[in-house]
């Protein structure tokens, strides 16, 4: 689609006519020499004297090119543009942080595959989380792993393939044997500080209890709530186990409740898949689409055409003037010979 950025400038098109009608004619005074015997010379040469006033004349080509060039210049001033089809750009409306427990207890092979084979907790989690990431195409996703300490693995990014590759190389025990849940939440809060997304979600996945975080998990959850961060917690393992292997769902529920989140049980592979399926429903993909139309400036075409017309016209006039001058010089030389012959005869 073509359009003019400043269409009101087209009112300048009749400006030369207004100047021609309203301005007084151009006058120029020149010094002249009066010759008393001028009529003898002119009659001898067969020339007819013209009036003393010189009135500039225009040729037909100038009458065509001048208004055409002016119209092209005004058109260039109006800034013609070509509006290309709109381009849509998808921006994520949510930042989603995954905090994965990779403590030593994640080595426990108490998950079963559909065919009945045992698999480690960490392997089941990686498979389910990977599928969850693939579905979140329009969310920026970050990844934190924690054990004896919490570590940021990937910042918030739309490059989900990078997240999946890093997740595939993550294994149990890499962050130490203990489980620092409070520190993981604190690190997530720090990661969200640079986020401009309106919706911030932290999905915390753990199979144990907090074993000595610098910041208590409940306090960290309260700070997260002040930062508008919603924490959903997925607990792994057998809640009826004893000792450090027991999952304290009461503490996990306090963390989620403090931020308006939910707690999910993932005692086995089927329950874990159900938990992430539910998370996928309660954290819908919120994104906004920005559309803009690229504009291509076209003013250089009418402006260039006007310049070429004027240059071409003046080159043509210079060529014609040069040829006329040569012809006039040749004629003048012939006339000089005739005048000299006349004076010789009279003498």
Image: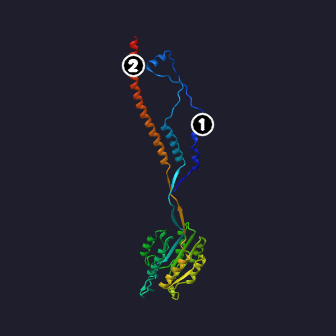
Q: How does the figure colour the protein chain or chains? A: rainbow
> Quadrant location of residue 197?
bottom right
Q: Is residue 187 visible?
A: no
Q: Of helix, strand and loop, which one carries label 1?
A: helix
Q: Position of residue 190 (x, y in %)?
A: 54, 69
Left or right of 165 in this view: 195: right
For this orientation, the residue located farthest to the top is 347
Q: Tell me the residue at 51%/66% (across/down).
A: 90
Q: Of helix, strand and loop, which one carries label 2?
A: helix
Q: How many marks?
A: 2
Q: Position of residue 126 (x, y in %)?
A: 45, 78
Depth-wise, is mark 2 or mark 1 nearer the camera? 2
In space, the residues marked 2 and 1 are separated at their CA atoms by 47 Å
Pointer 2: residues within 10 angstroms few (<14), some, or many (20+)?
A: some
Residue position for label 1: 21
Q: Position of residue 324 (x, y in %)?
A: 42, 30
Query: Which of the two residues, 137 or 249, is positioned nearer the viewer here?
Result: 137
Q: Tell me the residue at 47%/45% (across/down).
A: 305
Left or right of 293 in this view: 318: left
Query: Which of the two residues, 203 or 161, is positioned nearer the viewer here?
Result: 161
Q: Position of residue 329 (x, y in %)?
A: 40, 26
Pointer 1: residues within 10 angstroms few (<14), some, or many (20+)?
A: few
Q: Is 115 above or below relative to 39?
A: below
Residue position for label 2: 338
Q: Tell me the residue at 51%/24% (across/down).
A: 50
Which of the two labelled residues, at mark 2 and mark 1, occupies the earlier sequence position?
A: 1
Q: Is 87 above or below relative to 189?
A: above
């Amino acid at each position: 689609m073509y359009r003019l950025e400043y269409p009101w400038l087209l009112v300048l098109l009749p400006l030369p006519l207004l100047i021609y009608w309203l301005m007084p004619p151009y006058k120029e005074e020149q010094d002249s020499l009066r010759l008393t015997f001028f009529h003898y010379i002119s009659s001898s040469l067969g020339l007819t004297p013209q009036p003393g006033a010189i009135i500039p004349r225009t040729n037909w080509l100038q009458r065509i090119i001048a208004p055409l060039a002016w119209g092209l210049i005004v058109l260039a001033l109006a800034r013609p543009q070509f509006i290309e089809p709109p381009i849509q750009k998808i921006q994520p409306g949510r930042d989603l942080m995954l905090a994965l427990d990779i403590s030593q207890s994640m080595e426990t092979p108490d998950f079963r595959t559909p065919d009945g084979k045992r698999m480690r907790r960490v392997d089941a989690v990686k498979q389910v989380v990977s599928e969850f990431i693939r579905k979140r195409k329009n969310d920026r996703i970050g990844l934190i792993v924690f054990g004896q300490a919490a570590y940021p693995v990937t910042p918030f990014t739309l490059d989900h393939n990078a997240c999946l590759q890093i997740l595939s190389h993550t294994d149990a025990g890499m962050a130490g044997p203990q489980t620092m849940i409070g520190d993981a939440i604190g690190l997530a809060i720090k990661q969200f500080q640079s986020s401009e997304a309106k919706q911030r979600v932290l999905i915390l996945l753990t199979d144990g209890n907090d074993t000595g975080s610098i910041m208590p998990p409940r306090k960290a959850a309260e700070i997260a709530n002040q930062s508008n961060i919603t924490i959903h917690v997925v607990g792994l393992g057998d809640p009826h186990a004893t000792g450090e292997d027991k999952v304290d769902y009461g503490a996990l529920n306090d963390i989620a409740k403090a931020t308006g989140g939910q707690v999910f049980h993932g005692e086995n592979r089927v329950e874990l898949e159900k938990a992430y399926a539910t998370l996928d429903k309660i954290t819908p993909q919120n994104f906004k689409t920005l559309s803009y139309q690229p504009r291509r400036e076209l003013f250089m075409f009418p402006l260039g055409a006007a310049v070429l017309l004027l240059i071409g016209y003046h080159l043509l006039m210079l060529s014609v003037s040069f040829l006329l001058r040569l012809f006039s010089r040749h004629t003048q030389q012939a006339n000089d010979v005739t005048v000299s012959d006349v004076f010789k005869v009279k003498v």
